[in-house]
Amino acid sequence: MEKRTFANPAINDSATFIKTSDETNGEYTLIEIDLGKSDGPPLHYHNAFSEKFEVQEGTLYVQVGKDKKVLNVGESVTVPAGTHHRFYNERNDKVKFHITLNPGHTGMENFIKIFYGLAADGLTDKKGKPKKFAHLAVALIISDSNAPGWMSLLSPVIRATARRAKKDGTEKWLLDTYCS
């Protein structure tokens, strides 16, 4: 049976695929996240899908644009495509929440597998960022993860690095190693 749960020791969480894009014919992806105290990912956005965050246990903090929300059990927020957002956990208690990507997105599923696999193999820094820029670039491009503001100035460099990584076999190695 295919592995469905992936742990990321660098950012103190794990992700379990409840339903993949393939399993829903692309309609949605459903992921369960167990997150300890963490800054979570930096502010970012996706153009290809919306994300719904729904708390199962504990308290989740979600920033949508400049608005910071505190979600408790049973509460949710949907982040439309193209909207800057991030999630995090300020508390010592773990939070368990679901993320629904609509439509489903195999690239984001692979992003999680790659990032968590690299972290488990010691190939990320303490915050979970891949040590090799090519690994980061590939993951960002396949997941449609984009940086807002001044960080967006790096987009052409990220795209060029990802294209080079595709040509030199780095992308294939990441997908074969962590997503097969």
Image: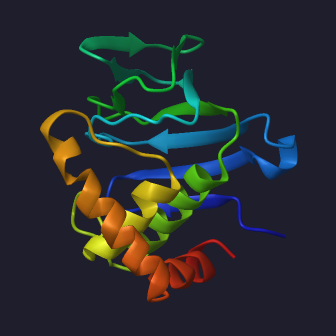
Q: Which of these two is toward me, 152 or 75?
A: 152
Which image quarter: residue 32?
A: top right
Report the residue that reaches farthest toward the left.
150
Asked if residue 13 is positioned above or below residue 68 in the image, the reply reads: below
Asked if residue 65 is positioned above or below residue 10 in the image, the reply reads: above
What's the residue at 33%, 74% (across, down)? 134
Question: Residue 24 location in percent, x, y?
Answer: 85, 41
Question: Residue 120 location in percent, x, y?
Answer: 43, 73
Asked if residue 154 is positioned above or below residue 96 in the image, the reply reads: below
Q: Is residue 128 visible?
A: no
Report the residue that reaches farthest toward the bottom.
168
Q: Which of these two is toward me, 131 or 70?
A: 131
Q: Is residue 36 visible?
A: yes
15 relative to 60 in the view: left or right: right
120 relative to 66 in the view: left or right: right
Where the N terminus falls, by quadrant?
bottom right
What's the residue at 27%, 52% (across, down)? 155
Where the C terminus falls, by quadrant?
bottom right
What's the residue at 27%, 77% (across, down)? 132
Asked if residue 68 is positioned above or below residue 166 in the image, the reply reads: above
